[in-house]
Image (cartoon, grey):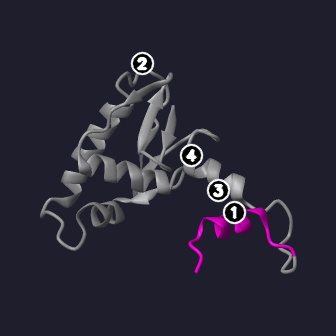
């Protein structure tokens, strides 16, 4: 399974895109991808999805969204193998294999391979500076 968050938000399995319907499911997926392989608390997910005005049953609504997202990205579970979107106290974790999430691949590509040298700018900083508007 591959996850794209840089550019369009997408999930691919065996080369096929898994459609993620609805703004809340897409927002949930985005938050989990930004924290891939780390537990995100249910409280934080409710706050991220509904802001300062969550529904009275915020945690129940979150469980519904998680269930919907699981069905979208893992339609064959449990026959399909290990669960990718897992419940883990105090919330949820999206467990992704190395190299399957575009945000992590970008972090690894931009990570400095040597100690920082203030005289010689790093490749990531040069690349970032080239993208910034001038003038």
Nearer the camera: disc 4 or disc 1: 1
Q: CA distance from mark 2 to mark 1?
A: 44 Å
| Residue 40 % position (x, y) | 43, 58
Give the number of the disc on residue 102: 4
Q: Tell me, yes or no, whether the two marked residues, 2 and 1, touch with CB atoms within 8 Å.
A: no
Which residue corresponds to the image point at 38% horizontal and 48% vertical from the top-left?
Answer: 29
| Residue bearing the label numbered 2 | 79
| Residue bearing the label numbered 3 | 107
Q: CA distance from mark 2 to mark 4?
A: 26 Å
Which residue corresponds to the image point at 56% horizontal and 51% vertical from the top-left?
Answer: 103
The quadrant holding residue 125 is bottom right
Circle nearer the N terminus (4, 1):
4
Residue farthest along the top direction in this orientation: 79
Question: What span is colored magenta in the figure?
Answer: 120-135
Q: Secondary structure at mark 4?
A: helix
| Residue bearing the label numbered 1 | 127
Q: CA distance from mark 4 to mark 3?
A: 9 Å
């Amino acid at each position: 399974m591959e996850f794209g968050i840089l550019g369009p938000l997408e999930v691919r399995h065996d080369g096929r895109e898994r459609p993620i319907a609805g703004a809340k499911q897409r927002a949930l997926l985005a938050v989990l991808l930004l924290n891939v392989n780390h537990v995100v608390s249910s409280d934080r997910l409710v706050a991220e999805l509904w802001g300062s005005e969550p529904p009275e049953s915020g945690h129940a609504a979150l469980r519904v969204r998680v269930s919907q997202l699981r069905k979208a990205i893992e339609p064959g579970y449990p026959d399909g193998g290990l669960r990718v979107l897992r419940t883990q106290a105090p919330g949820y974790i999206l467990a992704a294999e190395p190299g399957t999430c575009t945000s992590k691949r970008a972090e690894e590509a931009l990570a400095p391979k040597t100690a920082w040298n203030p005289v010689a700018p790093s490749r990531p900083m040069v690349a970032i500076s080239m993208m910034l508007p001038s003038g």
